[in-house]
Amino acid sequence: MTVTSDRLDMPARRRRHARLIAALTTLIGACAEAAGAVYQPIAAAPPGQGAVEVNLLPCHQVSLSAALLLDLARSEDEAGWSAVVAWERQESRRTYAARCAVAAAQELIEEADPPGEHGVPLPTVEQAAAMDLVSAGTEVAAQWRADPEAAVVLVHELAAGGELAVDEILDEATDAAVLTGLLALHEARTAPDPSTAAELCLGAVPHIALAVALASADLD
């Protein structure tokens, strides 16, 4: 697509994150197969049968391999779009500096009128800048799940001041959705019974599907 002269001729986000998106869709299938390995033997058992032997190995496998699969996909995307990655890092440095400037100004105000209580230390300028991006990504991911159109408006509002970039917010939102899915899969490994493990595998799927939507979204 055509973009302004101060940035690269950027690929569509679904191309930029193609390996990650493919890995996420593979993970969705693996979660379904893992749950099926628990539910299918139960469905096939005669009505009068009590205990049914199920296969928990796929649940454990998908739980253990998910993060590695996604990390590998991210590294392959970065290798394939090295020039874009360099531009993204430059843009991230710019927005981070802008957030630091805002946080520093806020710190001066708070020094004059401290909001903290009981000696609890306030975040440093650098910590506040990092937290702002994480907070924006988490907020957008939650809103996207409920109302994608409202989430698009929110992204533009968050980016309006220049301290955050649209793609930066969407990438952080993608990471937030991925993390929630991975946490569900991690719980599946220590589930008290096979049915709960299967339910946790399936419970990760909506978060992974949300990550696909966010990684694919182009708002420009």
Image (cartoon, rainbow, N blue to C red):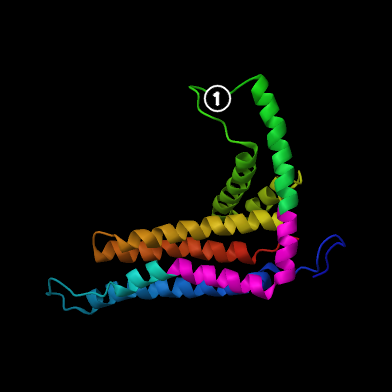
Q: As drawn, is 104 to the left or to the right of 46?
A: right
- For the C terminus, the quadrant is bottom right
> Percent from the top left, x then y, of residue 116?
55, 24
Q: Identify the residue shown where x is 58% and y is 45%.
A: 135
Residue 91 counted in the magenta span: yes
In the displayed structure, does residue 182 sit left or right of residue 123? left
Dot 1, crowdedness within 10 Å: few (<14), some or many (≥20)?
A: few
Identify the magenta region: 66-92
Residue 21 shows in the view: no
Image position of 113 (left or right of 163): left
Is residue 117 shown in magenta? no
The image position of residue 200, as x and y in percent, is 36, 61
Q: Residue at x 49, y 57 (%)?
A: 179
Q: Residue at x 65, y 25 (%)?
A: 110
The three-letter code of the residue at mark 1 reads Gly
Q: Quadrant of residue 204?
A: bottom left
Residue 56 visible within the image:
yes
- Prevalent SS, magenta region: helix
Closer to the camera in the image, 19 or 37: 19
| Left or right, 183 with reference to 154 | left
Residue indicated by mark 1: 116
From the image, which quarter does the N terminus lie in? bottom right
From the top left corner, tell me how far across and down residue 213 is, in percent: 59, 64
Report x, y in % for residue 112: 67, 20
What residue lies at 29% left-to-right and 60% top-to-bottom? 190
